Amino acid sequence: MVTELTYHANIFPGTRQELVDQLAKQLRPKRFHHVLRVEQTALELAAQNNVDAERASIAGLVHDYAKQRSDDDFIAAIKAYRLDPELLDYGNAIWHGVVGAELIKRELHIYDEDILNAVRHHTTGDVYMTPLEQVVYMADYIEPARDFPGVDEARRITAKDLGAGVAFQAQHTLLYLVENGLPVYPKSLATFNAWVPRYQR
Ligand code: DGI
Ligand code: FE
Ligand code: FE
């Protein structure tokens, strides 16, 4: 079922449809359809976890807003907004969330820090994540078109316990990075340490 809610809280200065239109302009069709699915999954997880539906919708829609920006755009933004210069050692995988949040603030006029943090942390997680941040982190991982070994287990665990889902993803993402010799962003390791041991039985 597709839920289309009406925005009331003035978090985004426009209607949901206007926000969807901005994303359609910003993203290629495949990515655009992914963000619509993440929105729907975020709404389901929000309902199960007492998270505000309007924030879940907006954060789900905008989480990959900057995914298709050029490296040059990100590098310019890191410098212009005086973000951590260590960011320059990473790439689009990290930038589209952390730097993307700054572009969302300035271009979409969304200033809600819970939403911005959900975008910033949707790829790597963080030591402390609000319920909204956890919802977006998990919705991105388990939206219906995701297909990787373990995704059904991730869906089952997350339906039972959102935090256990966060731990599952943190563990499996770190494994994936290490197995493939990819640079581990320090926050990904911190997320692992904060969440994974605590959910071991
Ligand atoms: O943007 P999406 O594809 O929807 O999903 P995402 O933002 O969760 O990005 C997933 C990718 O990010 C996946 O290929 C693993 C990668 N990733 C996650 N943590 C790290 C990372 N890549 C690097 N290099 N370092 C990390 O710590
Ligand atoms: Fe992403
Ligand atoms: Fe995504």
Image: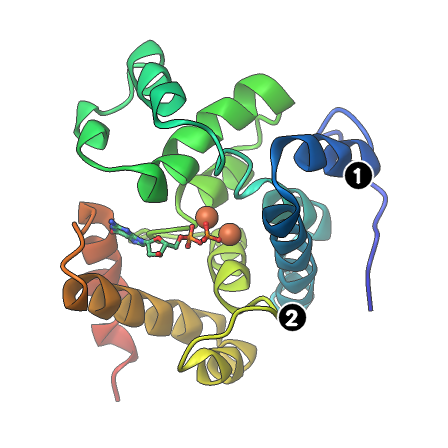
Q: Where is residue 125 in the image (x, y as percent from the top left)?
A: 35, 53
From the viewer's perspective, is 196 left or right of 44?
left
From the viewer's perspective, is 149 left or right of 111?
left
Q: Can residue 109 be seen in this view?
A: no
Which residue is tagged 2?
48
Which of the numbered marks, if any, corresponds to residue 95?
none
Query: Please, what is the three-letter code of the amino acid marked with disc 2?
Result: Gln
Q: Can residue 139 be seen in this view?
A: yes
How many other residues sit within 10 Å of disc 1, few (<14), some (14-19) or many (≥20)?
A: some
Q: Position of residue 151 (x, y in %)?
A: 46, 78
Mark 2 or mark 1: which comes first in sequence?
1
* Location of residue 76 with respect to 139 vertically, above or below: above
Q: Quadrant of residue 46?
A: bottom right
Which of the numbered marks, if any, corresponds to residue 16?
1
Which residue is rendered at x = 82% and y = 59% of the image?
3
Q: Distance between the residues labelled 2 and 1?
A: 22 Å
**Label 2 element class:** helix
From the viewer's perspective, is 17 left or right of 96?
right
189 or 151, nearer to the observer: 151
**Label 1 element class:** helix
Q: Position of residue 194 (x, y in %)?
A: 24, 62
Which residue is rendered at x = 58% and y = 66% of the image?
143
Query: Please, what is the three-letter code of the amino acid marked with disc 1?
Result: Arg
* Location of residue 183 with respect to 11 vertically, above or below: below
Which residue is rendered at x = 62% and y = 31% of the image?
26
Q: Position of residue 87 (x, y in %)?
A: 23, 31
* Location of residue 8 with respect to 107 vertically, above or below: below
Q: Quadrant of residue 179?
A: bottom left
163 or 3, nearer to the observer: 3
Q: Of circles 2 and 1, which is in front?
A: 1
